[in-house]
Each structure stands twice: as structure tokens, then as C-alpha cells.
Image: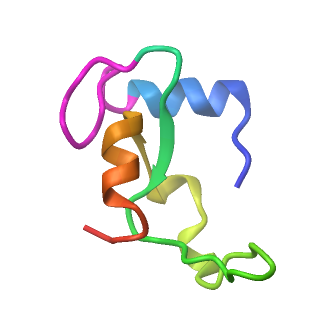
């Protein structure tokens, strides 16, 4: 899902500007990560678990945490 600038800022503030996983301060480059994986079709790129592609399932994450988590759910 594509977030608006306002939604992105609200998501960042969900953890007071910190990564939801490691707690580091988020700078300008951070990811909106799906807590429960969406799992995308490798050929089309479309989400297979569309019920997980909602703003309530997003967490602010630093690049390192998002890349390490990949498509795993917590």
C-alpha cells in the first residue's frame, strides 16, 4: 500500500520516531514494514495476503531491521 506523507509521519510517530524493532532513531530513510507479512507473488508482485496490506499492520522500521526481517512475521 502507498502511504500519504501524513500517514507516513503518523506511522513514524507511532514509536516516537524510533524503529519498532531495535529502537534506533529513524532518520529520513526508513521503511514502513508489514508486521504480518503480505507475501507477494514473484511474477506479478501483487500481494497474496491482501488482508495484511493495511495501515494497522505497518510498523516503522530502520532499513537494517526491515532487510533482516524480510518476509517473516513476528
The residue that appears at 46% across and 50% down in the rendered structure is 33
Q: Nearer the viewer, residue 60 or 44?
A: 44
Q: Main secondary structure of the magenta part?
A: loop
Q: Is residue 39 above or below residue 1?
A: below
Instruction: State the residue lying farthest toward the right.
Output: 44
Q: Position of residue 2 (x, y in %)?
A: 73, 47
Quadrant for the N terminus in the image: bottom right
The residue that appears at 68% across and 80% down in the rendered structure is 42
Residue 2 lies left or right of residue 35; in this view the side is: right
Q: Is residue 27 above or below residue 62?
A: above
Instruction: State the residue lying farthest toward the left.
Output: 22
Q: Position of residue 38 (x, y in %)?
A: 54, 73
* Residue 59 magenta: no
Rendered image coloring scheme: rainbow
Which of the 4 image quarters holds residue 60? top left
* Residue 19 magenta: yes
Residue 18 lies left or right of residue 38; in this view the side is: left
The residue stretch that appears in magenta? 14-26
Q: Position of residue 47 (x, y in %)?
A: 67, 76
Amino acid at each position: 500500500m502507498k502511504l500519504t506523507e501524513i500517514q507516513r509521519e503518523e506511522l513514524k510517530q507511532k514509536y516516537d520516531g524510533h524503529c519498532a524493532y531495535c529502537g534506533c532513531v529513524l532518520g529520513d530513510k526508513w521503511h514502513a514494514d508489514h508486521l504480518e507479512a503480505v507475501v507477494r507473488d514473484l511474477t506479478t508482485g501483487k500481494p497474496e495476503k491482501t488482508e495484511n496490506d493495511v495501515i494497522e499492520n505497518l510498523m516503522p522500521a530502520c532499513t537494517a531491521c526491515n532487510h533482516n526481517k524480510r518476509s517473516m512475521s513476528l
